[in-house]
Amino acid sequence: MSDEGLDCEIDKGITTSEIEDDVCNEMMVIVTTKKTGNISVDEDVPRETWAKKVEFLLAVIGFAVDLGNVWRFPYVCYQNGGGAFLIPYSLMFIFGGLPLFYMELALGQFHRCGCLTLWKHICPALKGVGYAICLLDLYMGMYYNTIIGWAVYYLFASMRSELPWTSCENSWNTPYCALVTSNFTGEKNTTPAKEFFERSVLEKYKSDGLDHLGPIKWSLALCVLTVFLLVYFSLWKGVRSTGKMVWITALAPYFVLFMLLIRGISLPGADEGIRYYLTPQWHKLANTKVWIDAASQIFFSLGPGFGTLLALSSYNKFNNNCYRDAILTSCINCLTSFLAGFVIFSVLGYMAHIQNKSIADVGLEGPGLVFIVYPEAIARMTGSVFWAIIFFLMLITLGLDSTFGGLEAMVTALCDEYPRLLRCHREIFVAVLLIGVYVGALPTTTYGGYYLVNLLNVFGPGLAILFIVFVETAGVCWLYGVNRFSTDVECMLGYKPGIFWRICWTYISPAFLLSIFTFSILGYEEMIAGDYTYPTWSINMGWALTASSILCIPAYIVYLFCITSGSFLQRINKIMKPTEHFNMTATTNIISATTTTTRIINSSKNVEGLCAHAANISYDGTCV
């Protein structure tokens, strides 16, 4: 749809003689009006946009491509049928993950605001979804940065002539420590890399678990502080600072991945590892768990629901092709996961070769893979110090992009909701917020912090995010309506989404989310399984964390219902109906207004988004 000749009709007229200054999601608009006449619009404080389109793409790719692409996808793939797993994974991507990814990019770009302010344009009653997302981002910031802090600790520990996990002759080693090449058979025997992670980095042996976490390990707390400082200087200036940082944090992992791939495939046994990774086990496709794992992997890999895609796309130009962006960035994310599998399994094949073991006996999922198994392999390579440094630099940059995204979602949401209080003092607000998150993260740097990290990972965002995104999708596609949303997309791109996308948004994506949520609730015990048995009180606390974010949704509905005037049915109608409608594609500087109708008239200057909301003005969304 071309900007020229586009007029947008506002059905309700101006019935008030006074319109207050209004901070819109696109810009701060200062208007002056009379009962009949012209309304002049002064673009005073424009919403900042990405300096370059590529910076937005890198930010989205950096957020989506995180540590899970390296430590979870390869494991899930070979556990669920190897190459055969790519069939359910691809189907879940096409019918579940990609439609949600596209929906969030389009929502953020059209409404130009974060996950809180968005809902007054969609369904005011569901604003609790935005608060729930902010709470989840807070929980994630309290443990995810600690994992990056572990990588920072490893990075500094690698800067010496010999890696500290190469031998068993260190102060933290036990009599059970044995080199992987020594063919040890004792049940209690461990490797130097495992003891370095558990007894030097974490020092778990000084804690009794969650019942007694022990004191803070200050060297680890300092590493986590380094992460928070990097995050601050990436977020304090908004997209101007983030856009510069992602050139490093989004691109560097790919250089390192390709270097590690070249090195990995040259190792003896690498071909066996890759063969194990890709060999199809077709019989496993009959197992329901394989399909649920594929759905979970694609959802958490793409990352809809954390508010990040909304926030990042809200700084785009209004007519940016978000459809093409969604296809490009989501495909890059999935291909990166596939590439990481070659990097990981070439090294696992090498480790199995030197230990004369099956690859299934070597591999680990999660932190154990990148902090124990892979470092153990690096220690056996020529030039081990160099490979260790670039590997942990890769982990740090992978993690930083994702934590930028999560915290930016919360910052954007709150700044859009409280612009005069927070947006004008963004640097101070970001500093106060990160100080608060860092203080909340300090318990994860104690000697028993590892158990707390795992608990927060499962019960913080791990379960609740699935239900919250289901409600978000239902609000947009069922209450706001797929047809209305498709019209919004048409205003930006010039064409409506095809029937495939509308069917996915209406039926398939909600079913996709509800299925993952149901099976995750039923199988939560597997998510926290391991050598440590979590006490009952900690599981109860975990469910309380999950409930704390989910309850934001009904709590806000009740609150809004109580403060809304009218009868029962009138209140329901008011809280379900969008309170602000405006045309984001209008290109104008002058609004011609009368008491019965207002027409937005085009001018030659392109204003990317005009807020027509003021007092009693409401735009019905009709473009003529």
Image: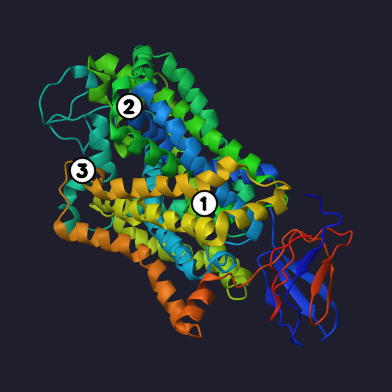
Q: Secondary structure at mark 1?
A: helix
Amino acid type indicated by mark 2: Leu
Based on the displayed image, in which of its 4 quarters is residue 310 positioned? bottom right
Based on the displayed image, in which of its 4 quarters is residue 122 positioned? bottom right
Based on the displayed image, in which of its 4 quarters is residue 596 positioned? bottom right
Q: Secondary structure at mark 3?
A: loop
> What residue appears at the point 65 percent right and 46 percent down from the top-left corner?
322
| Residue 12, placed above or below residue 57 | below
Q: Which residue is mark 1?
A: 405
> What residue appears at the point 89 percent right and 59 percent down from the top-left corner?
604
Residue 414 shown left or right of residue 196 in the figure: right
* Closer-to-camera residue (51/505): 505
Amino acid type indicated by mark 1: Gly
| Residue 494, placed above or below residue 13 | above
Res. 345 in view: no
Amino acid type indicated by mark 3: Ala
Q: Which residue is mark 2?
A: 285
- Residue 440 placed where, x, y %? 36, 63
| Residue 571, placed above or below residue 1 | below
Q: Which residue is mark 3?
A: 529
Q: How many marks?
A: 3
- Residue 364 placed where, x, y %? 28, 31
Disc 3 from disc 2: Cα separation: 24 Å
Which is closer to the viewer, label 3 or label 2? 2
* Closer-to-camera residue (101/366): 101
The mark nearer the N terminus, 2 or 1, is 2
Disc 2 from disc 1: Cα separation: 34 Å
- Residue 521 placed where, x, y %? 27, 50
Q: Residues within 10 Å of mark 2 (few under 14, many from 20)?
A: some
* Closer-to-camera residue (55/620): 620
